[in-house]
Image (spheres, rainbow, N blue to C red):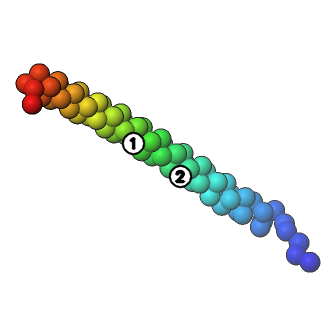
Amino acid sequence: MVHWGPGEIVPLGGIAMVIIIVAIGNFRRIRERELQAHSELRQREMEHERHLKELEIEKLKLEIEKSRKGP
């Protein structure tokens, strides 16, 4: 059986603490990027919907003009 003394535990604890801090920082950065990408995607989606509505309005205007002119 392995006996762990303070000489082995303290350095391992320090290394583990550094690894945990770096991991937390990386997870936070990844989450921020994910939220930013989601926000950009939502903005593009809204712009696309607005563009589709504008095209629909133009289509209706053309149909009205066409019906006014008659066959």
Residue 53 pos. (x, y %): 29, 30
Q: Nearer the viewer, residue 24 or 51?
A: 51
Is label 2 in a helix, a strand or a loop? helix
Residue at left offset 66%, top offset 61% = 15
As displayed, is residue 26 above or below residue 57?
below
Residue farthest along the front direction in this orientation: 71
Give the camera-side residue of 60 and 23. 60
Left or right of 62 in this view: 45 = right
Q: Earlier in the sequence, mark 2 or mark 1?
A: 2
Query: Would you call the spot at circle 2 few (<14 residues within 10 Å), some (14-19), or many (20 or more)?
Result: few
Q: Where is mark 2, residue-wise?
A: 26
For the question of whether residue 65 can be seen, the reply is: no
Q: Position of residue 27 (x, y in %)?
A: 56, 50
Q: Are marks 2 and 1 in contact (CB under 8 Å)?
A: no
Residue at point 39%, 42% (across, down): 41
Q: CA distance from mark 2 to mark 1?
A: 22 Å
Residue displayed at 11% across by 21% down? 68
Q: Indicate whether 25 appears above or below 62.
A: below
Disc 1 marks which amino acid? Leu
* Residue designated by label 1: 41
Q: Which mark is residue 63?
A: none
* Residue nearer the viewer, 48 or 68: 68
Q: In this rendering, is residue 17 above or below 60?
A: below
